[in-house]
Image (cartoon, rainbow, N blue to C red):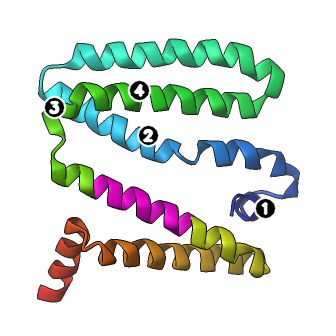
Amino acid sequence: LSNQLIIMLSSEKFLDAVLPMKILCPLIMFISISNLIGTQIFPALNKEKTSLLVYSIAILVNIAINIVLIPKIGATGAAVSTIIAEGLVTLILLILSRKLIFTKECFINFFECLLSGFLMYIVIYFTLPHLHGIILQTSISILLGCFTYCSILFAFKNVYLMQIINKFIRK
């Protein structure tokens, strides 16, 4: 889908951005988790210094890796560096907060969402080559992705999905 989005949003001249874009895809997940813990939960628990230390370490790691990789592989190196730094922030914050916020239900929900996302990726990956046209590929990928993800969560009887469904049913 990266090729199609790059062409749709810019032009074929920017196809070199596809690899960095693919590398940066997990960034949404990393930043979502780390921001929740590092900028919302930790400050509420008076752990601002811990957050600051973790983010400072990540900045230094990012700079060091950028110095090594950008001269060799350009934008791809910057993407790799960013993913490593953000992944490190997320990992450290998860480890530091595991006793504060994680329950069995939280872990099960996380696993269900992760598995659903992976299976959604597989379905889209094998469907995409059979579709032709950027608009068709993008539209079908979004619809099929949403349907697959939600169907798998429904099959798991995911607690949060069921709450959403129940809200719609009651209205």
Query: Which mark is in front, 2 or 3?
Result: 3
| Cα gap from disc 1 to disc 2, whole angstroms | 26 Å
Task: Indicate whether 147 appears above or below 74.
Answer: below
Q: Quadrant of the N terminus?
A: bottom right
Mark 2 or 3, nearer chain start? 2
Q: Is 112 inside the magenta-drawn segment?
A: yes
What residue is rendered at 26% in x and 16% in y? 50
Residue 89, label in figure = 4
Q: Which residues are magenta?
A: 109-121
Q: Are marks 2 and 4 in contact (CB under 8 Å)?
A: yes
Give the residue type at disc 1.
Ile
What residue is rendered at 29% in x and 28% in y? 95
Query: Which mark is in front, 1 or 2?
Result: 2
Q: Position of residue 79 (x, y in %)?
A: 65, 34
Q: Are marks 4 and 3 in contact (CB under 8 Å)?
A: no
What residue is rendered at 62% in x and 12% in y? 64
Give the residue type at disc 3.
Lys
Q: Is 67 inside the magenta-drawn segment?
A: no
Give the residue type at disc 2.
Phe
Residue position for label 1: 7
| Cα gap from disc 4 to disc 1, whole angstroms | 32 Å
